[in-house]
Image: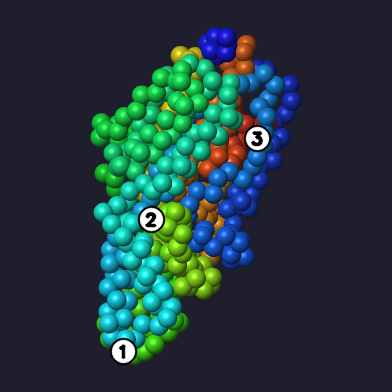
Amino acid sequence: MIAMIYRKNCWKVVLSFLITYHFSLITCSAQTSRKEMFKDINRTGSNYFAYPGPTAKKLTKAPAGYVPFYISHYGRHGSRYMSNNGYYVTAINKLDSAHQFGILSEKGREVLAKLKVGYADAWHRDGDLTKLGAQQHREIAHRMYERFPELLTQSLQIDAKSSTSRRCMLSMFNFCQELKRLNPLLDIVMDASKHDMKYVVEDLSIKPAETTESKHYEQQRAAIFEGAHDARRLMSVLFTDTVRAAVFVNGRELMEALYNIAEDLQNVPELNISLMDVFTKDELFNMWTGYNAGWLLNTGLVPGSTPYYQQQQEVLDSIVSTAERVIREGKPTVTLRFSHDSSVLPLAYLLGLKEARGGKADIPHLYKYVSIDKIIPMAANIQIVFYCKPGNDDVLVKFFLNENETTIPVKTDCAPYYHWEDVKDYYQID
């Protein structure tokens, strides 16, 4: 019965009132303070941050009579091991050498022991999906089913595609398996082929012209990054003789290695080890600001920086054209795409999601305007849900970032819902 409702033609709604929706300031939800980061120090991991789950328990109800008929989902793979275990090799070799020379402190010995446990588990798993990563996607799929039962309890054909990366394919598999478990009537076709990559990941063959500001911005970012890696305190904690240790240990290199390991360990909680206490909260915060600025500059989200987000334009075009086809055919369905952090971030910007907009040419304080841990944690996802009302041809759409309702800079009389025709116009001119 529900499926038949979606197939009915709709008539344009004649609005009898003035659209007076007041826009919220784009930067409000994106601002991040030191105090806020300290409440959950794992967030200093930036794109290593393990998926926190949605914050809102209840969703804004759709206008009367509107029901979901299509979901376009675009997600990052779940929690993973570090893509390169070279950080483990660097840290273990340096601390092990210090141990042989008898200058490793008690804390240093504790850190070395934990590193060996972590490395043994990560060996030959560079970039692989962790158990937590699989669980994250099953839980996201489960919540999608519970949030949109009008759609997902039907007999549907679902198209799922992923990057050819193993972690993306396994993320897709876990997501789809959970949906199938909840509704055996779902006909899900999964694929991961180079043939479809232009609709799944950014197109790196697109080379935006470098802007004159980019070099200046990068110099500022590099200064922030290097300044944050002042390893003098860390060296004094790990070694009993920092003068001898400095002969064969590059403190800055060791600090970067330990930061990456410490942040990624939150994605393998079953090991029950942490290295976060090796650093002070201020050190973690300062390193995070450097990584945050790097991501935003390398994606082009800072005004005047090289617009690398253009590499994701074809994915956005595919999302729009697929939605148009679904609306035209009138057949309820779901589209699932599984990609990477480097794909989700530029897409969030192109879509106009408030969390990705508002960047300022203030590199030292860029984190106050856009914070990537809010956008691309492990298992990050963007969901665009389409709604139709029987008897109308006015399609509404709502945007979710990491399962939280969000907004785009388009006027609407039914926030956080938008008229699809208005959204399409925005994407054509932006």
Name the residue furthest right.
Answer: 17
Give x and y (percent) for residue 284: 49, 68
Please give the residue where the numbered disc 3 appears in the rendered image: 59
Residue at 25% in and 35% down:
194
Q: Which residue is mark 2?
A: 298
Distance in Å between CA atoms under marks 3 and 1: 59 Å
Q: Amino acid at mark 1?
A: Arg
Q: Percent position (x, y) of residue 232?
A: 42, 83
Q: Are marks 3 and 1 in contact (CB under 8 Å)?
A: no
* Relative horizontal placement of residue 143, taking residue 214 as reference (left or right): right
Of pointers 3 and 1, the one earlier in the residue sequence:
3
Up/down of 293 relative to 96, above or below: above
* Place of residue 256 in the rendered image (x, y in percent of width and height, measured from the top left): 37, 69
Q: Is residue 297 visible?
A: no
Disc 2 + disc 3, Cβ < 8 Å: no
Closer to us: 374 or 84 = 84
Q: Which residue is mark 1?
A: 244
Sooner in the amino-acid sequence: mark 1 or mark 2: 1
Can residue 358 be seen in this snapshot?
yes
